[in-house]
Every structure is written in structure tokens, then in C-alpha cells.
Amino acid sequence: MSKQNDFSDLNDEQRLLLLFHQLHQHTTTEREKERQYLAKKLNDEAIQSLLALHIQLSAQLSQHPMPQRVEYAESLTIIANLADELKVIARGLRPLEVDTLDLVDTLEQAAALFSEQTNIPVTFATMSIPDMPNHVILLLYQLLQAALDNVAQHAYAGQVWVNLWATEQEVVLKVEDDGQGLASVGRITEPAQAPGLTLFDLMLRFRQAGGHLTLQSHPDEGTKVTAVFPLN
């Protein structure tokens, strides 16, 4: 029997905990595969079809009398808006940058897009970062996205700082805001302490991938999330 499934030396609580972690890891892997598949279908098929239709209708616009041109123009606007909405959905499922860019560019683009959409300034500071595997880039991207979503929806922040750096032993991502903070949080390092399912899931996934995640927040003192991944 493999070491992974040998429960003989574990008590009931340890067996349940190990089974839970294995189930969570399997579910996470399958979920990411499905998200990647759906994002690819949207980008390669649905969005491309809409863009092709937009080009086709645009070419026909001048061939019609004015009343019909107005209708065509309205249709073009609807098609363009739908394509933009699908791009947002596809990006939420799995951003293309995760598979095509390095860690720095992926996070920097996410921060810039957030600032553009919310008008909340984001200061992005980084240094030379070694190449990271895609699953780590995806995890750090999803952490940044979750932190920025919290800023947009709940924090009432006026500024966000994103710092990414590496030492000889580890790579660190820190996301900090100057918002209203979270009551009754303090400092959290364990998944069981997480104040919500999103953070609980992220903390578990970071731990399973070999990293760890810390949340610090106090009322009127903002929120700071720090992720650390070993480089070995």
C-alpha cells in the first residue's frame, strides 16, 4: 500500500483530516481543469465568433440607408459589450497571462486592471523574481484577485500596495490596503481561523502547495495579506 493511503498509524481524527486534505486537493485540481477548459472555450470560440460578427457587420454598415445604419450601430454596440463581458468572465475563470507571462507581468497586469476599473491607486513594487511554476503563479494571482476584490467591495480603501520580492529561500507577495480593516480578525495563519470560504480555500491550497498565507487586519488599520512560497 502506498504511504499516502496507509492510515494504520493514524487515529480517527488524523485519518479524517488526511482524507479531507486529499479530497480538497483532488476537488481543487479538477475545478482548475474545468475553469481552464471553460476559459479556453470562451476565448477561442465564443469571443472570437463575436469579434468576427462585429467585423462582418461593420463592413456592411455603409451599404445600408441611414435608418438601418442606426440599427446596425446599435447591434454592433451590443456585440462589443457582450464580447467585453465574456472577456471579463473568461479572465475570472483563468487569465491568459498565467499560461503566457511570468509571475511579475501577470500580477502587474491584474493590479493595473483593478486600478483602471475602480479608480483606486495601486502601487506595485517588485524585484527580479525567478521563474515560477504555473500552479504557483495561478495561486498568487488568485490571492491578489481575492485581496483586490475585498478592497473594492468592503474595505473603503483609498490606496493599495502590492509588493513582490524573493530571497534565496522564498518568494513573497504582500498586498496591503489603508481601508477600514476587519473586526475580530487580528492575525490569522490557520485555515480554520479564516473569516470566509474564499480565504479558507486559499489558505488550504497554499499549504498543500508548500507555501503559507497570513492575514492581518484591525479596525481602521487596513488589511495585509502575505503569501510565502519556498523556492526549493
Image: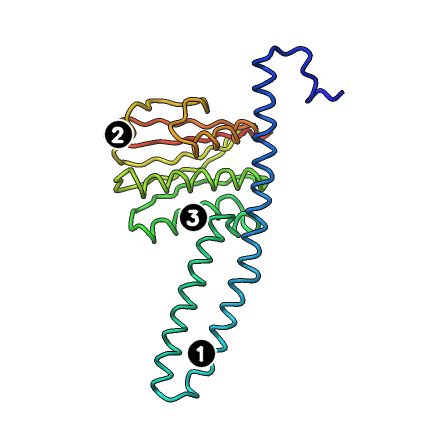
Residue 221 in the image: above or below residue 3: below
Q: Is residue 208 above or below residue 97?
A: above
Look at the numbered discs 2 and 3 and tell me whether their residues touch, using CB distance below 8 Å. Answer: no
| Quadrant showing the N terminus | top right
Q: Residue at x 34, y 43 (%)?
A: 123
What's under tag 1, amino acid-wise? Ser
Q: How is the image coloured?
A: rainbow
Question: Which residue is more in the foreground, 152 or 119?
Answer: 152
User: Secondary structure under badge 1?
Assistant: helix
Observer able to see residue 209: no
Res. 177 image quadrant: top left
Describe the element under mark 3 as helix, strand or loop.
Answer: helix
Answer yes or no: is residue 192 visible.
Answer: yes
Residue at x 41%, y 73% (from the top left corner): 76
> Mark 2 vs mark 3: which is more N-terminal?
3
Task: Return the disc, 3 or 1, that comes first in the chain's sequence.
Answer: 1
Cα gap from disc 1 to disc 2, whole angstroms? 52 Å
Frontmost residue, 55 versus 179: 55
Which residue is nearer to you in this view: 144 or 167? 144
For residue 185, above or below residue 162: above
Q: Position of residue 117 (x, y in %)?
A: 34, 53
Q: What residue is shown with label 3?
A: 110
Disc marking residue 221: 2
Check disc 1 and report the residue beneath it.
58
